[in-house]
Amino acid sequence: MGFLDDARAKLGDAVNKHGDKISGGIDKAAHTIDQRTGGKHADRIGSGVAKAKDALTKLDRPRRDGEGGAR
């Protein structure tokens, strides 16, 4: 197992254990940024949140040996 495979596995384990907290942190950060920018960049913030949560979903899927995301 290479360095990146090992890192991906560890990150996946962390997401499996703490995914709800990570998702909540993303929402909280997005809300804070939106407030501080006066809502000027709400569409971009929303897009970033959607991409981050999509990445979390991909990491949270149960994995089997030899199966993984994009390399």
Image (tube, rainbow, N blue to C red):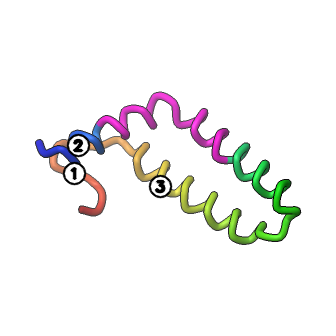
Q: Which quadrant of the rendered structure holds the N terminus?
A: top left
**Left or right, residue 66 beside residue 59:** left
Write the residue at 18% across / 44% down: 3
Q: Residue 66: percent from the left, percent from the top?
A: 16, 49
- Camera-nearest label, 3 or 2: 3
Q: Residues within 10 Å of mark 2 (few under 14, many from 20)?
A: few
The amino acid pointed to by label 2 is: Arg
Q: Residue 35: percent from the left, percent from the top?
A: 85, 54
Mark 3 lies on a secondary structure that is: helix
Q: Residue furthest front?
A: 36
Give the labeled residue for mark 3. Answer: 55
Give the labeled residue for mark 2. Answer: 64
Q: Residue 56: percent from the left, percent from the top?
A: 49, 48
Q: Which residues are magenta?
A: 10-26
Sequence-first disc among 3 and 2? 3
Q: Residues within 10 Å of mark 1 (few under 14, many from 20)?
A: few
Instruction: Look at the magenta stretch and give its main secondary structure.
Output: helix
Q: Residue furthest right?
A: 38
Quarter of the figure with residue 14: top left
**Left or right, residue 21 beside residue 4:** right
Give the labeled residue for mark 1. Answer: 67
